[in-house]
Image: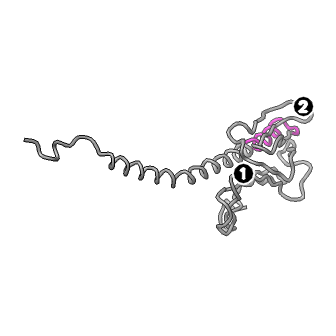
Amino acid sequence: MLTAHEAQRGATLIEFLIAFSILGILVATAVPSFRDWIVNSQVRTAADTINSGLQLARTEAVRRNTRVSWTLANSAGGSWRVTVPDTGATIQSRSGNEGTANALVTSTQNDIVFNGVGWVTPTPGAAIQINVSNPDAGACQSAGGGGGPIRCLRLLVGAGGQVRMCDPALGSAAAAAC
């Protein structure tokens, strides 16, 4: 003779409804965090590729012992190109549609030229700032911990050609602060 426990097979409709309700609640709480993670990844990717492009331009200027230019071609997505101004030759270019179309890049100077020793020419009065954000997804985080959900980044290019990526939301005591 079978006991009541041995005779039951599968799950009841109520058990399925409870399981799906719990799963729905978990998904509903995870989706906003996942969206913020995706947006922050796009901002980070755009900043990383701009950093790589600037480093490439400086390295090629020193290697070729000539002027090499990094140009922000389009602020939407951060399209840029590295060229040799004297010959017009393109060394490398990147389209903003390559994974970071939602990023917005603003710069205090859209054309940065490195000379044969790796310095910025003409010498800027202050560090050139390149800001990467995503205004469609919300405001940037601020230094006091307030602001929006987006972790915006900034690249600084000094007169000596040094390129540094920093986080404007960090306090001045942090190494990655601007």
Which quadrant of the figure contains the C terminus? bottom right
Q: Mark 2 touching mark 1, by CB under 8 A?
A: no
Quarter-of-image position of residue 154? bottom right
User: Which residue is labeled 2 in the image?
Assistant: 88
Element under disc 2: loop
Res. 119 visible in picture: yes
Disc nearer the start of the sequence (2/1): 2
- The secondary structure that most of the magenta stretch takes on is helix
The vertical placement of 125 against 6, above or below, is below
**Residue 18: x %, y % from top left:** 37, 51
Residue 73 is labelled as: none
**Residue 42: x %, y % from top left:** 66, 46
The three-letter amino acid code for the residue at tag 1 is: Asp
* 24 sits to left or right of 72: left
User: Which residue is labeled 1 in the image?
Assistant: 136
Quarter-of-image position of residue 85? top right
Q: Nearer the viewer, residue 20 or 72?
A: 20
Element under disc 1: helix
The three-letter amino acid code for the residue at tag 2 is: Gly
Closer to the eye: label 2 or 1? 1
Residue 126 falls inside the magenta stretch = no
Q: Which residues are magenta?
A: 52-67
